[in-house]
Every structure is written in structure tokens, then in C-alpha cells.
Image: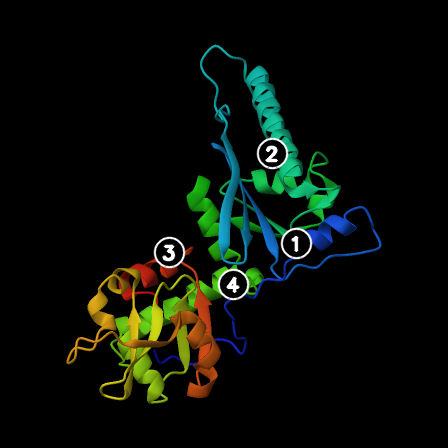
Amino acid sequence: MILSHSSPSIHQCDNKFHTEALTALLADDDKFIVISQQRSEGLIVMDGNGALFGTLQGNTREVLHKFTVDLPKKHGRGGQSALRFARLRMEKRHDYVRKVAEVATQLFISADRPNVAGLILAGSADFKTVLSQSDMFDPRLQSKIIKLVDVSYGGENAFNQAIELAAELLQNVKFIQEKKLIGRYFEEISQDTGKYCFGVDDTLRALELGSVETLICWENLDIQRYVLKSHAANQETILHLTPEQEKDKSHFTDKDSGVELELVECQPLLEWLANNYKSFGATLEIITDKSQEGSQFVRGFGGI
């Protein structure tokens, strides 16, 4: 596919820095700070119907916990004194904020310190503001608040909307970069610019021509690259096969002589691309199917 460079960074197949063992060794030593490669952001969504707690780390968003709440509306039923109803309503709201604060501490504090790099509070009412200023909210988490976001939905829809609205603060989160990158690719298609291609054959052909600026591949692209040699014709053939196609033995047999072809090389296509994309003058972007755009790219365009 032909796109302008989206980022000077290049994402290799495995760009994870595994810190589990190091973290375990240093957990009790405050003199050391372990920095992981991917930031984890916490999100709390509050409205009059309930609360949701989630995280966004790298490409993955996860709902950790959610609960509903039954709060009295602004106007009481007939027979209740206005003062008594107002007091009851305030007590319920107070209890709700306290529960959210307690759950937040349970989820976002580990080993006496925050386990998220930042916190985003979202909601359609003023609950997020009340929580952010409440003395019931753990001060260690208060210091991590990076944005309060107004959303027009509740629950998981609000979770997704909050990620979108806080995107400018999360530019380093690859999930956002992935959505923007594939969004631009879809834009090229919708405008029929001709500056795109998809599928293994067309993409490799464009690479050979030196026409690709940005190569987008799914991280779980399940295609093998075979180099097969026919001794009868004294020539090599390159095939790119899916697991289903690999079951067809005719791919590995010389069509003229019926003799089995010699296997010269076999490796995942993604691995081969990761080793060779620079020689074609392209940049390589590895994406997931965790976002809506990524999933559509994988299902509709084969992941390459």
C-alpha cells in the first residue's frame, strides 16, 4: 500500500521489553524504578446509572470492572418532604462516589503505588468532577489525573468515546496511532486515489516496484513464505500459502514431472517482511485487530 510516512518509528515483530522477573526482584526496593515500554492509562467512567473502570495499554483496552447504581432522581415522589428527600439523595450520591473511590484504589493501586501512568475521568454528569476533588479519592490516584472528559454515553460506549476524546493526551499509545494509520488507509480507498493496494500478491508486487512507503501488516498474519526448487527445470519458485493452502500437496509438486519440489526455505511471511522491508525503501507498521479499524482491516483486506 502507498501512504505517506505516518511516523518515523518502526515497529518490529516483538518490541516488548519483558520486565516480569526484574519487577519481582525489585518490588521491595524503593531505590529502583522499573520503566516498562508501554504506558498503561486508567479510565473511570461515571454517570447516574453506574461506573466503569478500564485500562488502555499499548494496543489493548480492557474493562476491569463495572457496576450499576440506583440513584434518586432530582424530584421526589409525592408525600416525601423536600428536605428529607434532598438529604437522602445526597447520601446516595455520597455513597456512590465513595464506592467508586474504593474500587479505584483496589484496581489502580498495587504494592502501595499507582499501577497506571495516568488517569482519565469521564462521564456525562458532574460525578467525575466530584470524584476528582473528593477527599475520599486516594491522593496517589488524584495526582495521576490527566484529564476530565465529558461524554454523551454511559458504560462501554463512554469508555470508547473517552479514549477518542483524550486522544491528544494518548498520542504515544499505539492503539491511537493504529486507528489513525488504518483510518488514513481507508480514506485513500474511499477517495479512490489509487495510492493503496491490499493482499499478498499486489502488495509484494508494489514492494518490488519500490512503490510502497508504508507497509501495514497484521501481527498474526498466518502466511508462510516458501522457496521451492525444481531440479528438472533448475529454477526456484516462491509461494505464499495460508494454513489451508499448505494442505494441498500439489503446491509442492512439479507440475510437469510430478516430482516433489525441494524445500529451500520456509518462514513466516511477516518475519521475512520484517527482515527485508528496508531494502524496498518502505517503513513497516505492525497492527493488531483490537481496534474496530484493525479488525476491519484484517477481515476485509487480509491483514496486509
Specify the farthest residue to the top.
79
Q: Answer with mark 3 or mark 2, whichever residue precedes in sequence.
A: 2
Residue 250 location, x and y as percent?
A: 20, 69
Q: Assess whether mark 2 and mark 3 are in contact (beta carbons under 8 angstroms).
A: no
| Cα gap from disc 4 to disc 2, whole angstroms | 28 Å
Which kind of residue does numbered mark 3 sit on?
Gln
Q: Answer with mark 4 or mark 2, whichever residue precedes in sequence.
A: 2
Specify the farthest residue to the left.
256
Q: Assess whether mark 4 and mark 3 are in contact (beta carbons under 8 angstroms).
A: no
| Cα gap from disc 3 to disc 4, whole angstroms | 14 Å
Which of discs 1 and 2 lies nearer the camera? The answer is 1
Which kind of residue does numbered mark 1 sit on?
Ala
Q: Answer with mark 3 or mark 4, whichever residue precedes in sequence.
A: 4
| Left or right of residue 294, residue 134 in this image | right
Which of discs 4 and 2 lies nearer the camera? The answer is 4
- Circle on res. 100: 2
| Cα gap from disc 3 to disc 2, whole angstroms | 29 Å
Q: Which residue is mark 1?
A: 117
| Cα gap from disc 3 to disc 1, whole angstroms | 25 Å
| Cα gap from disc 1 to disc 4, whole angstroms | 15 Å
Residue 54 location, x and y as percent?
A: 54, 44
Q: Which residue is mark 4?
A: 174
Task: State which quadrant residue 182 falls in.
Answer: bottom left
Which kind of residue does numbered mark 4 sit on?
Lys
| Left or right of residue 304, residue 290 in this image | right
Q: Answer with mark 1 or mark 2, whichever residue precedes in sequence.
A: 2
Q: Is residue 160 above or below residue 303?
A: above
**At 51% from the left edge and 60% from the top edge, which residue is drawn?**
167
Q: Which residue is mark 3?
A: 292
Task: State which quadrant residue 170 falls in.
Answer: bottom right
Quadrant in the picture for the C terminus: bottom left
